[in-house]
Image: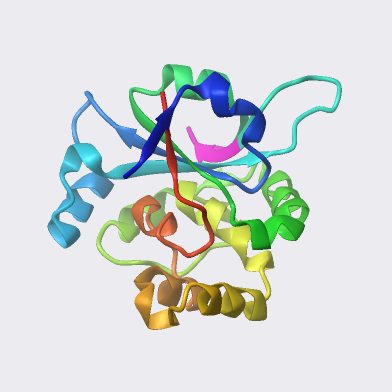
Amino acid sequence: MIWRLPYDKIRDRIQPGDILGYHRCGVGPTGIAIYEYCLTKTPIDCCMTHVSMCVSGPEILDRKVIIEAAEGEVNVRALSSTIHLHNGRAFWYPLREELRFFRSAMDRFCWNQVGKKYDFPGLFSNIFGNVSMDAKKFFCSELTQGAFYVLPYVIIQEILKSKKKKEKDFPSLKLFFAKKALRPQQLVQLPFFKPCIEIL
């Protein structure tokens, strides 16, 4: 079961390090959506096609800010306008409580990537199979995934232990450790998040 709540009800709970996932609707399937359907039989209109990360905003402004790889580069946007303009469904993936001490390091990583070029070749190649991470340019999930490499291996193992799971139970985690760029749908299946909430 997925909780569904209005943005104004959860806005103040969204913090740096949390992930926003987006399902695209109404414009036609993307290559990523088609690939996910072929691989997992996930309906095309339910496939996640974009992710971004919440980061710290200007202290003098009460504004939620995200950093994402989109429109040719890594850029900064207001979360509220992104959700308002998005043609589809949006989901909030809160970071697990055990990882709260790493929020600032993840935040720093994202801010340090602003202005870098979009990884168009990597995005195209990733449709057919997970490519190696590129630190010089990013597509959306590649950027967001990069922030999670600040997590110590021992912390990830503690999370698995608390969930009574092993690495093999999370196919995305094997790709993560191999530094293979995850697609959006794979990224949110990492064991780093609390249950997601759909934003209305």
Query: Taking 184 as reference, is 46 above or below it?
Result: above
Is 68 part of what is drawn in magenta? yes
Residue at the image point whose x is 44% and y is 72% from the top: 173
- The reply to whether residue 74 is visible in this rendering is no
Q: Quadrant of the C terminus?
A: top left
Please state if 78 lies on the left or on the right of 46 as rendered.
Answer: right
Relative image position of residue 31 (x, y in whole percent): 24, 46
Residue closer to the observer: 198 or 184? 198
User: What's the coloring here?
Assistant: rainbow
Residue closer to the observer: 99 or 183? 99
Is 78 part of what is drawn in magenta? no
Query: Taking 170 as reference, is 116 above or below it?
Result: above
Please state if 59 lies on the left or on the right of 28 as rendered.
Answer: right
Residue closer to the observer: 18 or 34? 18
Relative image position of residue 105 (x, y in whole percent): 76, 56
Q: Which residues are magenta?
A: 67-74
Residue at the image point whose x is 57% and y is 29% from the top: 10
Q: How many marks?
A: 0
Please state if 142 lies on the left or on the right of 107 as rendered.
Answer: left
Relative image position of residue 7 (x, y in whole percent): 51, 23
Q: Quadrant of the N terminus?
A: top left
Q: Quadrant of residue 127?
A: bottom left
Dominant SS in magenta: strand
